[in-house]
Image (cartoon, rainbow, N blue to C red):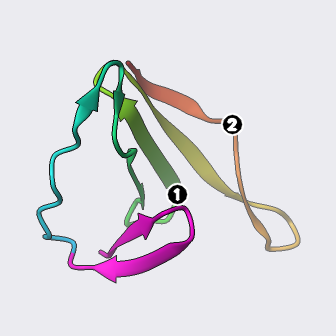
């Protein structure tokens, strides 16, 4: 497991996955920063993506990871797991 921080839409750096990040500041409908995470299941069959830009706005999706006859991996049709 690994975690990264993305700063100013330009730079990313790996951080300890147990790092306690500061709580976002709520500014009306939105946070001052976007929260997001993604992960791949242990069997490499699914990718989950979750993001939230405010206390009342975010999404979560799961994509199956498929393999073409040529051996190239690709994402299948997504399933929505949550909506806020």
Magenta includes 11? Answer: yes
Q: Which residue is mark 2?
A: 77
Q: Main secondary structure of the magenta part?
A: strand
Question: Which mark, by number, is residue 35?
Answer: none
Extreme residue in the front direction: 27
Residue 58: quadrant of the picture: top left
Q: Is residue 9 left or right of residue 66?
A: left
Location of the C terminus by quadrant is top left
Q: Which residues are magenta?
A: 1-16
Magenta includes 64? Answer: no
Secondary structure of residue under mark 1: loop
Q: Which residue is mark 1?
A: 45
Q: Is residue 70 above or below residue 51?
A: below
Q: Is residue 16 above or below residue 55?
A: below
Secondary structure of residue under mark 2: loop
Q: Is residue 18 above or below residue 38?
A: below
Spatial separation of the CA atoms under disc 1 and disc 2: 13 Å
Q: Residue at x 15, y 54 (%)?
A: 22
Q: Which mark is nearer the camera, 1 or 2?
A: 2
Q: Is residue 82 above or below residue 70?
A: above
Q: Residue at x 37, y 72 (%)?
A: 4
**Place of residue 73 in the rendered image (x, y in percent of width and height, measured from the top left):** 72, 66
**Place of residue 19 in the rendered image (x, y in percent of width and height, measured from the top left):** 14, 70
């Amino acid at each position: 497991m690994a975690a990264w921080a993305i700063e100013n839409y330009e730079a990313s750096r790996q951080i300890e996955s147990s790092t306690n990040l500061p709580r976002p500041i709520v500014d009306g409908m939105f946070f001052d920063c976007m929260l997001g995470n993604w992960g791949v299941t242990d069997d490499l069959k699914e990718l989950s993506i979750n993001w939230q830009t405010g206390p009342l706005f975010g999404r979560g999706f799961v994509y199956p990871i498929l393999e073409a006859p040529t051996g190239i991996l690709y994402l299948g049709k997504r399933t929505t797991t949550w909506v806020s």
